[in-house]
Image (spheres, rainbow, N blue to C red):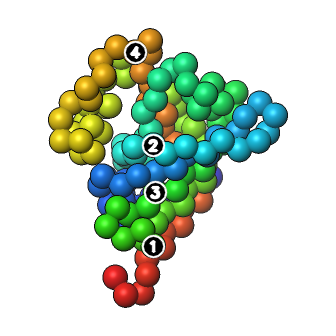
Amino acid sequence: MTRPLGEDAARLLDGPNFGFLATLMEDGAPKVEPVWVGRDGDLALVVTDGKSIKARNVARDPRVALTVVARSQPYEHLLIRGRVAEVRPDDDMAVLDAFSERYLGGPYPRRRWSQRIVIAIAAHLVRYHAPAHR
């Protein structure tokens, strides 16, 4: 069952906050790496190269976890567990450039890729935490 992200989760995904995406390797071992994050409604978005290990992992097993940490307050964070709902092409790099504007202040500088994709994650579990002294 897909869960709505909620206001706090949306705020973290919409800001220049870093995420950590966990995918599953072929042998079942977890692989975690830092990623830029975004959102389309209640879907969390991650952009990657279509030939990356994370892209191959989610093509084989759509189960993922994503943690997003607030840049200004690292004890404020979001945990999403879910599944890849869809993989979208981003060959024109429109989504990557939108992320880059947020994180770097301009279009993404590297323009040559074999294939760019957007991994759209539907949440089954959403947990937001902030310190009491925000």
Q: Please state which of residues 41 and 103 is positioned toward the viewer in this rendering.
A: 103
Q: Position of residue 71 (x, y in %)?
A: 34, 61
Q: Residue at x 43, y 76 (%)?
A: 130
Say whether disc 2 or disc 1 marks the residue closer to the N-terminus. 2
Residue bearing mark 1 = 75
Image label count? 4
Q: Could you tell me which secondary element the residue under label 2 belongs to?
A: strand
Say whether disc 4 or disc 2 marks the residue closer to the N-terminus. 2
Residue bearing mark 4 = 113
Specify the amino acid type for callout 2: Val
Left or right of 121 in this view: 76:
left
Specify the amino acid type for callout 3: Val
| Vertical side of 49 occupied by 103: above or below | below
Callout 4: few (<14), some (14-19), or many (20+) C-alpha neighbours within 10 Å? few
Q: Distance from label 3 to label 1 (Cα)?
A: 10 Å
Q: Residue placed farthest to the bottom in the image? A: 133
Residue bearing mark 3 = 68
Disc number for residue 35: 2
Q: Residue placed farthest to the left in the image? A: 106
Q: Could you tell me which secondary element the residue under label 4 belongs to?
A: loop
> Does the CB distance between marks 3 and 2 fall below 8 Å?
no
Say whether disc 3 or disc 2 marks the residue closer to the N-terminus. 2
Q: Please state which of residues 42 and 25 is positioned toward the viewer in this rendering.
A: 25
Callout 2: few (<14), some (14-19), or many (20+) C-alpha neighbours within 10 Å? some
Left or right of 74 in this view: 94:
left
